[in-house]
Image (cartoon, helix red, strand yellow):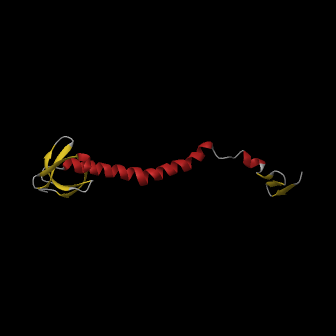
Amino acid sequence: MLSVVCGQWTVDVFKGVSMPHEAVGNAPPPWLSAVPLALVFLVFYMLLIRPQRKQEAERKSMIEKLKKNDEIVTIGGVHGTIVGVKEKTFLVRIDDNVKVEVDKTAVASVTKVQGG
């Protein structure tokens, strides 16, 4: 067996480099390997999940505040004025004598709030 000792390290030609015997007992604790995974999850939460939840809460608040005569744009791009409010839908006037009923979740944005 050909071995070369370099300081505390042993280089065996057939087995490669091995750690000193004292260092083998000083291995890091097993839970330490989960730290990078936890950090990745934390970054993922802070950059993606948290802002999305905040945006969804703002959207829900906007929809709850809508009332008659507010001007809206739907997710389909239809512009109109709310003329009626139901539990899950709005009655929207898009032109003279043309009214459509749209789901509350179909509202993309508010263009003009009446009286505020």
> Would you say 107 lies left or right of 12 here?
left
Res 25 quadrant in image: top right
Say left or right for 20 vs 69.
right
Which of 70/49 is in front? Answer: 70
Going 17% across and 48% down the picture, which residue do you hit? 100
Q: Quadrant of the C terminus?
A: bottom left
Picture coordinates of residue 48, whole percent (x, y):
41, 52
Q: State the residue at coordinates (57%, 45%).
A: 34
Q: Residue 114: x, y in percent?
A: 13, 56
x and y percent of residue 77 in the render? 25, 57
Q: Is residue 5 left or right of residue 66?
A: right
Q: Looking at the image, which residue sits at the far right?
A: 1
Q: Nearer the viewer, residue 34 or 5?
A: 34
Work out which residue is located at the far front of the displayed protein and give it. 97
Task: Report the number of numbered marks.
Answer: 0
Residue 2 location in percent, x, y? 89, 54
Q: Nearer the viewer, residue 105 or 77?
A: 77
Query: Which quadrant holds residue 115?
Result: bottom left
